[in-house]
Image (spheres, rainbow, N blue to C red):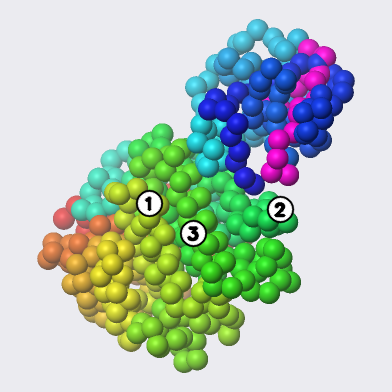
Amino acid sequence: MKYLSIASTIALVFASKVYADCWSERLGYPCCTSTNGIYFSDNDGDWGIENDDWCGIPKQSNNNSCWSKALGYNCCTSTSDVIFEDSDGQWGIENDDWCGIVKNNQPKVTTTTTTTKAAQPTSNPNIPQKPAVTYLNNNKDPAEKCDISDSITGDSLYKAAPFRMGVGLYGTNKSSSPVFSKKMREIIKYQFNSVTFTNLMKAEFMLDKSASQANARNGNDMPVLKFDTIVDGLEFCKENNIKMRGHTLVWHTQAPEWFFRTGFNDNGSYVDKNKMEKRMESYIKQMLEFIQYYYPGVIDVWDVVNEAVEIANGSYDASSGWNTRTKFDNNKTNPWYATMGPDYVFKAFRFARKYADKNVKLIYNDFNTFQYPKTDNICNLVKKLKAENLIDGVGLQSYLGPSWPNRNDYKNAIQKFGALGVEVQITELTISVENGNNKFTTQANQYRDVFKIYKDLKKSGVNITSVTVFGLQDHYLFYDNDNTETRLWDGNLKKKPVYNAIMNVLKN
């Protein structure tokens, strides 16, 4: 959708009369049929936007009308309890979201809570309105019975670490994110100073297919982003002075195929290089500008490109000098390469540098960074990016087995990247567990050895600036039948032996 501006001031007012006639037709505009959202008011009436053009809000005559619809919220239907009151009116909560209490039914306020609802439309017409922010304390917490007292007192990972300590926020929809659990939020606040969305900031969650298709039909062939999956996590970070890692801008996986095709249609042909370059720029621009406008300083590092180097035969373009990925997952086409060629990586970093705030770090992120010849190819890519001042660091995902890779190979790769004069960040640390009676003791020893590598290399001068463990809890309580056992807390949010092993290394 385009964001239009007729005047410098945008008013949010809701007219309170029943439908009479389409007053805006005499001015050359239809009346709105599917929106009550008011973007502007003048002497003629209240204006909304439909199909990328102005429409008149039908005039009403009933004081019992749903005044909160103009602010993007339904009116309450099953509650009259007032949770919050502001200049707009009185607010309740239904279905984990705000609702307006109809004015002639509003009771006396009995409770007030300081919290955040959706922001008003910004005065910058290029920045979309912030989606509604969830009142998190009103949610059912699957961890409510867990005793976390030993995790929110005493030792703290981030306070002991010589680098930023982060944790991955799992979730396949926003309501299954750890920020929707009060107990998990408390642990994160006490133990970590950085978080990363493992899924919810990727293109398949950020792109709005129907709105993008509407754009294309109206001659604007640029994507539309939606931010509803990430605002709750960003609010949590902003309120608690926690940094968030932006993950990830450009990746061949979890990027819907329709994004690369004509009209944003599943059955369309791939667009040409010029159009895809413009779409890439638009996507990066929208993402960075929204976050930097509403959440300045919260995201100070971005994984700009993910997993663009490949070493499997038949799946890379060696002409780039760094084995650009052309295929993945059993011969699937890398759509970024198919539409833009190997330049897509450099284009992404150039656009990220163009729109990122000056203090934001730009990272290339990959898995199996310790494998030969992948390490050398990543080094070649980093050198080229560094020559244009486009990159600040290398992200090592670090999915490790109990004995693979050889820890000296892993250590040598970290040293090799550090020697390039860039930051080294461990972005998705996960060490799998091997079956046995003492599996968690063995796992603790493996994490201990890896953190000792990080600490020793940091002390030797390698610029390791961040370590993120990719998940908080085994048998994740928001998922059914989660069997993962790679994390630092167990299914009851009790510290596993691995926590104490890491802490002992950090404290010594």
Q: Please, what is the three-letter code of the amino acid marked with disc 3? A: Glu
The structure residue drawn at horizontal position 49% and vertical position 59%, both measured from the top left corner, is 281
The label number, if any, that marks residue 281 in the structure image: 3
Label 2 neighbourhood size at 10 Å, few (<14), some (14-19), many (20+)? few
Please report the bounds of the magenta region as a residue range.
Answer: 51-71
Look at the image and say whether residue 13 sits in the magenta stretch.
no
**Residue 60 vertical placement versus 242 (above, below):** above
Q: Are marks 3 and 2 in contact (CB under 8 Å)?
A: no
Give the CA separation, mark 1 to mark 2.
29 Å
Give the left or right position of residue 62, taking residue 48 as reference: right
**Residue 390 vertical placement versus 71 (above, below):** below
Q: Which numbered disc, 1 or 2, marks the residue closer to the eye?
A: 2
Q: Secondary structure at mark 3?
A: helix
The label number, if any, that marks residue 356 in the structure image: 1
The structure residue drawn at horizontal position 81% and vertical position 16%, both measured from the top left corner, is 17
The structure residue drawn at horizontal position 32% and vertical position 51%, both measured from the top left corner, is 360
Q: Position of residue 474 (x, y in %)?
A: 49, 58
Q: Please, what is the three-letter code of the amino acid marked with disc 2? A: Asn
Quarter occupied by residue 59: top right
